[in-house]
Image (tube, rainbow, N blue to C red):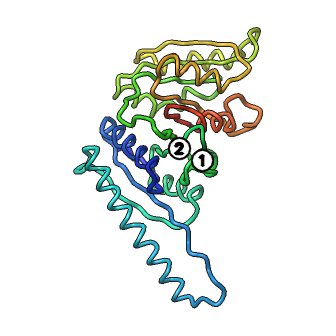
Amino acid sequence: MLKILVPTDFSETAENAMIYAINLAKKLEAEIIFFHSSHLPVIVPGTPFNTYDGLVEDEMAYSKKNLETLTDKIAEKAGFKNKMFSVVMETGFASDEIPKYAKKANCNLIVMGTTGASGLNYIIGSNAHAVMKHSEMPVIAVPKGFDSNLVPEKIILATDYKKTANQLTLLNKITEKFDSEIFVLHIQPDEHEVHSYEEKQEELSILEAVKPFKHSFHSQVSDDIAASIKDFAREKKAGLIVMVAHESDFMERLFGLSMTKEITHSSEMPVMVIRD
């Protein structure tokens, strides 16, 4: 069974992402783990250890109670009350604890909320890039205000034709369950760009991966890769943008983590980032 980790900071934006994750889980028949990471209380010099331990226990108990109350409310609201979900509390910084726990629990996906173009909320905040950079599983960022009940009928797969085809297992499951249409999009800064043999082979591999589904391939020339991807997604009225981020030399690569960060911060629709 698939597992989806859903971090929350108890904000409205996070609640929206929780509902989005539940709607995914229903179709994917997945288990959900609702997750919250609390900061440890600041140690005041001279504080006895037993007093500090008590503060930690109180903070954990208070946060866990809030988390359980929230998840029960959201699950009931989304019709997930009797389905598979659990709640987990950890202490530490979100950017560290989210990917760490996702790996420990063998999760297949992380879903979290963002406040979109105006910035990011606490859970993602300055931690968004770190979570995406360190997570070994795909991450979906759901922008504030996005209708969490909308299904991804149209999906944009933005690719640079490098190390993409082998990373599409989860995307294919989502596409199958939602009967989605995939638009494979390649943006090149130079209209005279010639694809290498490896890139042509990767294009064929992607074609093979998406062949069972409704799909089409598109190519555009633009110096502003991020803006072109978002414009194309808006034009197609897509419900999800998917990108594979490359770890090595990511500052120089078109689809490095810096590019995915830019798109995630300003996208009007959910963005799935997959590490190669």
Q: Nearer the viewer, residue 6 or 13?
A: 13
- Name the residue at 76% across, 36% down: 251
Q: Viewed as shown, does residue 22 lie left or right of 248?
A: left
- Name the residue at 48% across, 65% down: 90
Q: Where's the C terminus, which quadrant?
A: top right
Q: Amino acid at mark 1?
A: Ala
Label 2 CA crowd tier, 10 Å (few <14, some 14–19, many 20+): many
Q: Residue 155: image x %, image y %?
A: 47, 24
Q: Are marks 1 and 2 in contact (CB under 8 Å)?
A: yes
Q: Residue 194: image x %, image y %?
A: 74, 11
Displayed quadrant of residue 146:
top left
Q: Nearer the viewer, residue 194 or 186?
A: 186
Q: Viewed as shown, does residue 211 lie left or right of 131?
A: left
Label 1 CA crowd tier, 10 Å (few <14, some 14–19, many 20+): many
Q: Farthest top residue?
A: 192
Give the labeled residue for mark 1.
128
Displayed quadrant of residue 88:
bottom left
Q: Amino acid at mark 2?
A: Thr
Q: Viewed as shown, does residue 186 lie left or right of 239?
A: right
Determine which of the numbered discs, if any, sits on residue 114 in the image: 2
SS for dot 2 = strand
Q: Viewed as shown, does residue 153 lie left or right of 209?
A: left
Q: Where's the N terminus, which quadrant?
A: top left
Is tag 1's residue or tag 2's residue first in the polypeptide sequence? 2
- Name the residue at 54% across, 12% down: 217
SS for dot 1 = helix
Q: Residue 141: image x %, image y %?
A: 51, 40
Q: Is residue 265 above or below residue 208?
A: below
Task: Give the number of the mark in front: 1 or 2.
Answer: 2
Q: Is residue 160 above or below residue 57?
A: above
Q: Is residue 178 above or below residue 31?
A: above
